[in-house]
Amino acid sequence: MNRLPLAHRLRQHLRLLLAILITLFFLFPVYWLAMNSFKTADEIYASPPVWWPASLQLNNYWVLFKDGDAVSVWNSLVVATGSTVLAMSLGTLCAYSLARFKTGGDHLSNWIISQRMVPPIAVVFPIFLLYVFLGWVDTYIGMILLYTAFNLPYVIWMMRGYIQDIPRSLEEAALVDGCTHWEVFWKVVLPMCKGGLFATAIFTFIFAWNEFLFALVLTRTEVTTYTVQVTHYFGGQSNFWTKIAAMSVLGTLPVFIAVVFMQRYLVRGISLGAVKG
Amino acid sequence: MSLRTALSSSQAHEVQKQFARMLVAPAMLVLLLVAVFPLIYLILVSFQGITMMDNSSDFVGFINYQAILEDTRLWQALWHTMVFLAIALPLELVLGLLMAQLFLDQLPGRQIMVGLLVLPVVISPIVAGAIWSLMFDNRYGPINQVLGWMVGHDMPLLWTIKPELVYPAILVAEVWQWTPFMFLLLLAALANVDKSQLESASIDGAGYWRIFFRIVLPSIWPVMAIALLIRLLDLFRLFDIVWTLTQGGPGTMTETLSIFTYSQGFKQFETSYTAAVALVIVVFLSAILMWALKRVELSR
């Protein structure tokens, strides 16, 4: 580094400084949310704002649990987990068929991914009417099935890509050795795409976990998810900032933890498989 | 030994075909139920005259579609959506690309910083909206505070209420959340650009912009096109962030297409009219999608 000309070194320092400033800009709002969740009401409603709370008190969280609002996090967990398990099971089977046996050809694959891109607002309306008819509004089963359907195209599309990455020769060898198609799928294919399965499951979970519009329309009081619960604290006259902050942090924490464990697959996951990490 | 010789007998081939269909069936059933049922139902209802007051299922022809043409609020909602799209999408692209350039070469702490920049992308848009309503709060928010320091007196700006401020507020939140998305994809794409090609071009004396347009851009275009397509479709259905920040207000000033449709269906209970609107949106978007999917290399 020291041998480089001064101008070059200066540019490197400027680059680093700029990079740090940009990172701080994108992180500060998250920091602000987290800090507000620890503030007392007095500290939140202070002008000028308190940049660092006097103590990291947990009363805002305690209130959420005491009042039972935290149930919405549990509801999110049930709905997201249930739909992830279902979508992964159905989707991976379908993906294997598309990847290896070319079932339906490119047309079917393209149709499936285009289903992912239909705006929820167009679908939610008839589904709401159907759910009223079936008595599924505000039930776990209704939400789990809806999110399963909502995430299926994503799972099929991503898993199709991951399965295509596995060399075919292993499956062929297993078939020659007398394995049935099922055994090949269970014993050869699934273990080979463990990483992709895991990453896709996490993404599916996050999509269901973060979803709002379906939950807004299709839940009332029994299975309110955390995103809907957050919006309940916005009032016409005033907003309950302590609760908004604490509930938002509760809802964001699992997502942050999940992301740490799948850094390697992140770009592939959010680019619909277009970029292989 | 290839799969074909292993399964040379037609019986084995039949078994494989059956297996392939069996695997697809459950997923297809769910997808058809969710994709086809709503569509058929929307078509049916859109030709009826169901409103909150009138529950009759008589067919009324194209009245609802005619109403779409005359509904200025709907066209305004489309206009608002287009404004958000036309400003946010280029901003996210350019900022993301600049950031990707900045982070492309080795930097101390580069991995940690890139890891942290991922966070906005995975946060729920509802929470992102909540974060930015906190940031923009007129009395307790840090933004007005910092602005106040800069100008030397109090700046109690009503970011989510004043007509001239709501668009900047929503756009800041939107761009904050999704610029890192562009950044991550473009960073990966830039890292895959052929280095030797870049070197030989610069030895040949090609300038920065020439290299960018002749070598870098064509190389990252496939990824960029997909990133743009994903964001375009997301912005077209923009709902969550606007919902938490302004609920479409003041009045209907920031009402997007999705918020408009929601309020028609679930606040005014204009059932048949909402069905017609939703159907038009689906048809319109499918047309864009079919056009785009032919051009974008989404499948390998």
Image (tube, grey):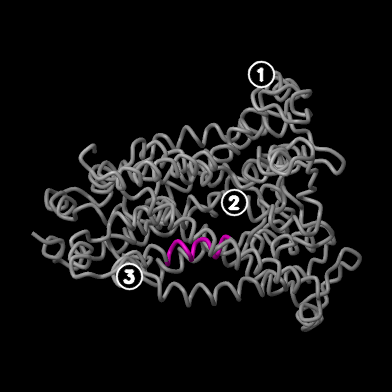
Q: Residue at x 43, y 58 (%)?
A: B97
The question of residue A205 being in magenta is answered with no
Are the residues at dot 1 and dot 3 in contact (C-beta closer than 8 Å)?
no
Q: Main secondary structure of the magenta part?
A: helix
Label 2, label 3: how far apart the Cα atoms are: 40 Å
In this rendered view, identify the residue nearer to me: A114 or A7. Answer: A7
Say which chain tag 2 marks.
Answer: A
Q: Which mark is residue A10?
A: none
Secondary structure category for the residue under label 2: helix
Label pair 2/1, CB-CB below 8 angstroms: no
Residue type beneath disc 1: Leu
Q: Amino acid at mark 2?
A: Leu
Q: Nearer the viewer, mark 2 or mark 1?
A: 1
Between the residue at mark 2 and the residue at mark 1, the CA separation in whole angstroms equals 35 Å
Looking at the rendering, the stretch of residues picked out in magenta corresponds to B225-234
The residue lying at 54 percent from left, 42 percent from top is A25
Left or right of B178? Residue B152 is right
As drawn, the label of residue A58 is 1
**Kind of residue at badge 3:** Pro
Q: Quadrant of the C terminus of chain B?
A: bottom left
**Residue B228 sits inside the magenta stretch:** yes
Whole-Å distance between the Cαs marked 1 and 3? Answer: 52 Å
Q: For residue B218, which numbered disc appears in the image?
A: 3
